[in-house]
């Protein structure tokens, strides 16, 4: 009779001890590198997963649901993989859809019996994959440089077909969306840190960073972050199933763009398109790292090109033949270069009030599209989608070298002006 009591006593004092030592070493924030792939503006980070710490490059999907990947190297060392079983709390947290019974002997990641399942989405091709969810240990590095383990990090080991159109060094996508299984949500619950992340996306050939949690930044980023403008993060209440290209709108981040201004001229836009239609999910403005350039509804795009070309002509910039997918291209010899890049008309996304706008200078609005040709780096939305379409999708090129803070807990987005105006860039970003 004495033994069980004693062991309970030892157990509880161990628990107290371990929670005490945890409290002392409790990290506040974690850091992840961000690299831009050579082609097609895909941005990825590097993670270590499994007991053998397989290193994986995974694209960053701001509006994604959960981590998915397909990697031979992981498979070869996946002894620590555990399926998420149907009917479990983890399955509920992952918001899994359905249960699969997959009998392989021995079982492999993605094909195990009685397993909580869900659809993963490749947002570049629109391909969806349905398979079992699992969990394994994820290693993360705090902003102080210490390594931590997140046990039971949920993900999907996906079919190789899902890797189509991913940039060469990447084997899947990691999700930052509004779910309980995204990377920020998981770190927030595992370490009791604020559900908040800062993204600083690099332009080519440099390396940016993402910081998840709350911490001071190194100079001059702390000052920059204190002087950022903020705008509410909005929700689109319509969840789309079966619309591969868009995905689940409820988990993406939306902001409230009221108008677009080119130079000093506000575009005449159909205001209905700028609002989220709460019934159909159409309209509004989302922010997505899986789109190379900001895409605009046909009528918004036409108005932007029209005004931009006019304002450029007033600066003696010569228009040349368009290079797809861009609708306005110019002779680069007729454009001056300044600290914020090509000296072209400024484009502002006006937000909740006249003093809150996200301003884009030449570095973020112009892209080289051949010898002597640079084009307005905005595109018309693909006319080919089958479901409700978001009118403005802010893409990766426009986010480069801006500090962005997604305070998910407070539903706020903070954004800096172009870091290049302050003689810095995302490759300098980090914690203090
Ligand atoms: C780690 O890798 C070795 C060799 O590839 C393998 O034998 C071992 O089972 C792996 N361990 C785990 C936990 O996956
Ligand atoms: C698969 O799981 C179900 C539910 O737990 C169980 O009834 C069944 O026996 C399992 N089948 C195999 C082949 O393990
Ligand atoms: C979309 O995501 C929300 C929030 O996670 C969830 O409640 C809803 O069931 C999802 N819808 C679909 C179709 O996956
Ligand atoms: C504005 O857009 C809405 C939604 O697409 C459309 O129903 C309406 O006809 C448009 N109004 C004008 C004046 O074009
Ligand atoms: C939609 O896209 C597919 C493949 O990209 C193409 O075959 C089809 O013609 C397009 N449909 C429309 C209406 O543009």
Image (cartoon, rainbow, N blue to C red):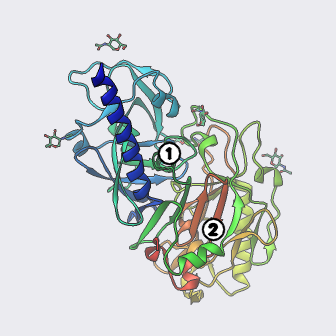
Q: Where in the figure is residue 223, as x and y percent of width and height?
A: 59, 79
Mark number, residue 74? none
> Mark 2, residues whose alpha carbon is within 10 Å: few (<14), some, or many (≥20)?
many
Near mark 1 (Cα within 10 A), the count class, few <14, some 14-19 or many ≥20, is: few
Location of residue 140 by image quarter: bottom left
Question: In the depicted view, which residue is nearer to us: 284 or 222?
Answer: 222
Q: Is residue 360 above or below residue 352?
A: below
The nearer-to-camera label among 2 and 1 is 1
| Residue pointed to by mark 1 | 189
* Vertical relation: 230 (above or below) 99: below
Residue at 77 percent across and 36 percent down: it is 279
In the rendered image, the vertical position of residue 387 relative to residue 306, given as above or below: above
Q: Is residue 340 visible?
A: no
**Viewer-closest of 406 and 303:** 406
State how far apart marks 2 and 1 are (Cα): 25 Å
Dividing the picture into quadrants, the one containing residue 403 is: bottom right
Quadrant, the N terminus: top left
Residue 399 location (% of width, % of height): 56, 66
> Ligand 3 closer than 8 Å to the CB at disc 1?
no
Res. 405 in view: yes
Locate residue 198 relative to residue 151 in the image: left or right. Answer: right
Measuring from the top left, give residue 244's x and y in whole percent.
54, 38
Residue at point 52% right, 66% down?
Answer: 215
**Total numbered labels placed on residues in the image:** 2
Tell me: is circle 2 under 8 Å from ligand 3.
no
Q: Horizontal and vertical percent for residue 276?
A: 75, 47
- Kindly identify the residue that appears in the image at 53 percent across and 56 percent down: 291
- Residue appearing at x 45%, y 71% in the figure: 430
Query: Residue 415: which numbered mark, if any?
Result: 2
Q: Residue 222 versus residue 20: which sits nearer the camera? A: 20
- Give the SS element for disc 2: strand
């Amino acid at each position: 009779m004495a033994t069980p009591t004693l062991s309970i006593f030892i157990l509880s004092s161990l628990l107290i001890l371990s929670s005490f030592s945890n409290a002392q070493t409790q990290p506040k924030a974690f850091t992840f590198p961000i690299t831009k792939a050579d082609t097609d503006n895909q941005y990825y980070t590097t993670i270590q997963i499994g007991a053998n710490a397989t290193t994986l490059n995974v694209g960053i999907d701001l509006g994604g649901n959960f981590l998915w990947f397909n990697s031979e190297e992981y498979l070869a060392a996946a002894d620590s993989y555990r399926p998420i079983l149907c009917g479990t709390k983890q399955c509920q947290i992952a918001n899994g859809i359905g249960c699969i019974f997959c009998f392989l002997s021995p079982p492999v990641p993605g094909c195990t019996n009685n397993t909580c399942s869900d659809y993963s989405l490749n947002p570049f091709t629109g391909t969806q994959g349905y398979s079992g969810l699992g969990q394994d240990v994820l290693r993360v590095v705090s902003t102080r440089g210490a390594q931590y383990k997140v046990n039971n990090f949920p993900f999907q080991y996906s079919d190789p077909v899902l890797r189509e159109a991913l940039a060469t060094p990447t084997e899947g996508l990691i999700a930052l969306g509004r779910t309980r299984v995204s990377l920020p949500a998981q770190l927030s619950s595992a370490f009791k840190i604020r559900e908040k992340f800062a993204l600083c996306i690099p332009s080519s050939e440099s390396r940016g960073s993402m910081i998840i949690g709350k911490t001071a930044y190194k100079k001059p980023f702390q000052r920059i972050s204190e002087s950022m403008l903020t705008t509410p993060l909005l929700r689109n209440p319509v969840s789309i199933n079966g619309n591969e290209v868009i995905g689940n709108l409820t988990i993406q981040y939306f902001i409230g763009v009221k108008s677009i201004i080119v130079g000093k001229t506000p575009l005449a836009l159909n205001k209905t398109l700028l609002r989220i239609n709460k019934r159909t999910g159409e309209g509004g403005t989302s922010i997505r790292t899986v789109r190379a350039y900001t895409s605009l509804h046909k009528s918004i795009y036409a108005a932007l090109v029209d005004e931009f070309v006019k304002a450029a002509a007033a600066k003696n910039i010569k228009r040349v033949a368009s290079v797809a997918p861009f609708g306005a291209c110019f002779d680069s010899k007729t454009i001056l270069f300044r600290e914020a890049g090509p000296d072209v008309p400024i484009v502002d996304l006006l937000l909740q009030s006249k003093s809150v706008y996200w301003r884009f200078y030449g570095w973020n609005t112009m892209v080289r599209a051949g010898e002597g040709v640079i084009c307005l780096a905005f595109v018309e939305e693909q006319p080919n989608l089958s479901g409700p379409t978001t009118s403005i999708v802010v893409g990766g090129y426009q986010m480069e070298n801006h500090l962005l803070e997604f305070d998910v807990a407070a539903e706020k987005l903070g954004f800096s002006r172009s870091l290049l105006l302050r003689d810095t860039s995302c490759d300098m970003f980090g914690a203090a």
